[in-house]
Amino acid sequence: MMMMTTTTTTTMLIRRRTAKIFVLLLACVLYILRLRHMIGELDRMTTTTTTTAITTKTSDERRRLTTRSLLPSCHPHWKVAVRSSSSSSNKKRRNGGRDEPTFAWSDSNTTLPIRRIYFYHVRKAGGTMIRKYLKSVASRYGVHLRVMEYGHAHVEEEVGERDDTVYVTNIRDPVERSVSHFKYDARWGCRRLVKDPSFVPTSSNAMPFESWNSTGGFVESRCDVPYSFVSCAVNCYLQAFSGRGCTNDGWRTEYNLAWDRLLRYNMILVYSKFDDPRYVRAVEDYFGGVRGFNAPSSMYCGEEAREANRKVPLRVSFEHVLRLTRYNEMDNRLYRDLVTSCFDEMEERGGEMAGGFHYSFPRVNSSRFVPQKNRTVVD
């Protein structure tokens, strides 16, 4: 009798363990199928975006395919942007009711003096470090430095407007930048983290990441006021460089305006390249050998935000990242056209060369910098 009871108990245990294993395997299979579905959805979305980009190309966009060698993201230069002089190209474009001047790069190797550096600081893309580095560059040569961060890219002056100025900006993968913006600024708000000593960050008083899904971060950007780069989750580059916080045609007009303005910069610093020693040295050589690019730097609210996120880790779902990627479709396209395609082509060509891939950034002729008696640093 006892032997039969023992056998029955053993059989039941085996059945229970088998059932648990079966449930676990079923859960794994369902998870894999779900993951494959989400990856397929992402691939489908990327394919759709690419198809849209191909089928909606304008004559201006076709022209851009031939200007890749001029992209300041992978081919920075020291040319001067001048207003177009021909009667046909000197016509002004309309931007939301106001005239936009047209620009072109001077073909000659200009020797015009440089008295000023202008940096448009894109938030959460290494801008604090760049500001610190450009201060060193401006100090080395005794020139002015002007930094703009919160307004749109032409809030005070048009990019390329002055022929004595070097124009610099920075860029990062749009979704990565958006997530970083939420994590280190919008989740609790720097004002509370820094200014309120009684504030204790918790999961209950944190903003939900799922609501970080609009052109203005948690809300839509206003259309009746110029865009300001204070809080942004969706199509932030198009807004910042076009100056418009909304669209009437799926962001195509804003894409064109942003693209044309970005091409007027002398250099666009790419965040994903900062850890590459070759890129760091190329940037430093571009500025005449001034060292210190990508040196550690502390940003406002950085330590407080890091400590808050350490205590209350941010959990980001794949589904929301997928949605955020879809929302940023046109920003992703801009980044791909401006950065990814250009560097991919450079690396492909570099792999075919005996010396391998390298960044061919031109070194400035330091004699072009003219020291200013009343030098100003405005940041």
Image: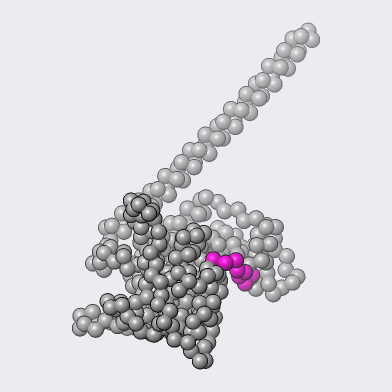
Task: Tell whether 201 sits left or right of 373.
Answer: right
Residue appearing at x 69%, y 19% in the figure: 12
245 displayed left or right of 108: right
Where does the image place residue 43, in percent across and percent down from the top left? 40, 48
Q: In this view, does 342 lie above or below 368?
A: above
Say whether residue 28 is magenta.
no
Q: Position of residue 148 (x, y in %)?
A: 49, 79
| Residue in the image at 47% along x and 75% along y | 120
Query: Which residue reaches farthest left?
Result: 87
- Where residue 223 appears, as percent x and y from the top left, is 43, 75
**Which residue corresponds to the image point at 45% horizontal and 42% vertical from the top-left?**
37
Kindly identify the residue that appears in the image at 43 percent across and 56 percent down.
326
Indicate the quadrant where residue 188 lies. bottom right
69 left or right of 322 in image: left
Magenta residues (range): 294-301
Can residue 368 be seen here? yes
Quadrant of the frame with the C terminus = bottom right
Which residue occupies the extreme right position in the image? 2
Which is the main secondary structure of the residues drawn in magenta? loop
